[in-house]
Amino acid sequence: MVEMLPTAILLVLAVSVVAKDNATCDGPCGLRFRQNPQGGVRIVGGKAAQHGAWPWMVSLQIFTYNSHRYHACGGSLLNSRWVLTAAHCFVGKNKVYDWRLVFGAKEITFGNNKPVKAPLQERYVEKIIIHEKYNSATEGNDIALVKITPPIACGRFIGPGCLPHFKAGLPRGPQSCWVAGWGYIEEKGFLECPAGTSPFKMGVAAALELCP
């Protein structure tokens, strides 16, 4: 199921679900269970994250007919039922049964067809809500919400991220920002992947790791 909503409604929905639909993910948002204060300043580059350093990071994976899963996009966990991600992820793949969500991962096997093992958790997609004015040509309004089913259970390696207040403006002074995702941790670099696999090159920020 895919819905199209305007910016105001989409953001109000995102903020309201953080406040009201947090039954299994109570507690403060943005809590990094293992701090990783050092990182890179480039999209390609940086430092491998410790497990639990970014507990709200979610891997959105395309699910194929032969039960293989392929990492396609990253997202941020808002609470036990909702993930915030980009609308462009669903161009040509907007059916809920096309997707699986993996939580608590530091490394991801690209094309994996095996069930995830604890502490990782895997969930289905119940609903996809895309910004009604998303423009695939310009990437304008590139925002979407994904509803999780069944609700995720937060824990040591899984926790919600934070959203700014709905009326919050831009920061008044310089602030440090972090970008996290799966990919190479250095330009033209290689990951230490399990035996029998080889690195999968991916043009995303590299605070977390991806193995094929």
Image (cartoon, grey):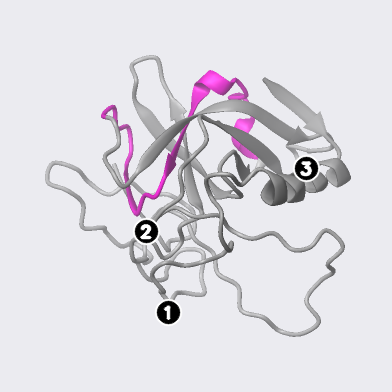
Q: Nearer the viewer, mark 1 or mark 3?
A: 3
Q: Is residue 93 left or right of residue 205?
A: right
Q: Secondary structure at mark 2?
A: loop
Q: Earlier in the sequence, mark 3 or mark 2?
A: 3
Q: Residue at label 1?
A: 38
Could you tell me the amino acid type at mark 2?
Tyr
**Circle 3 residue:** 13
- Rounded to the nearest whole Å, what is the CA distance between mark 1 and mark 2? 16 Å
Q: Nearer the viewer, mark 3 or mark 2?
A: 3
Q: Quadrant of residue 113?
A: top left
Q: Position of residue 137 (x, y in %)?
A: 75, 39
Amino acid type shown at disc 1: Gln
The residue indicated by pointer 2 is: 184
Tell me the mark number nearer the camera, choosing from 1 and 2.
1
Residue in front for this viewpoint, 138 or 206: 206
Nearer-N-terminus badge (1/2)? 1
Part of the protein shown in magenta? 88-114
- Say which element carries label 1: loop
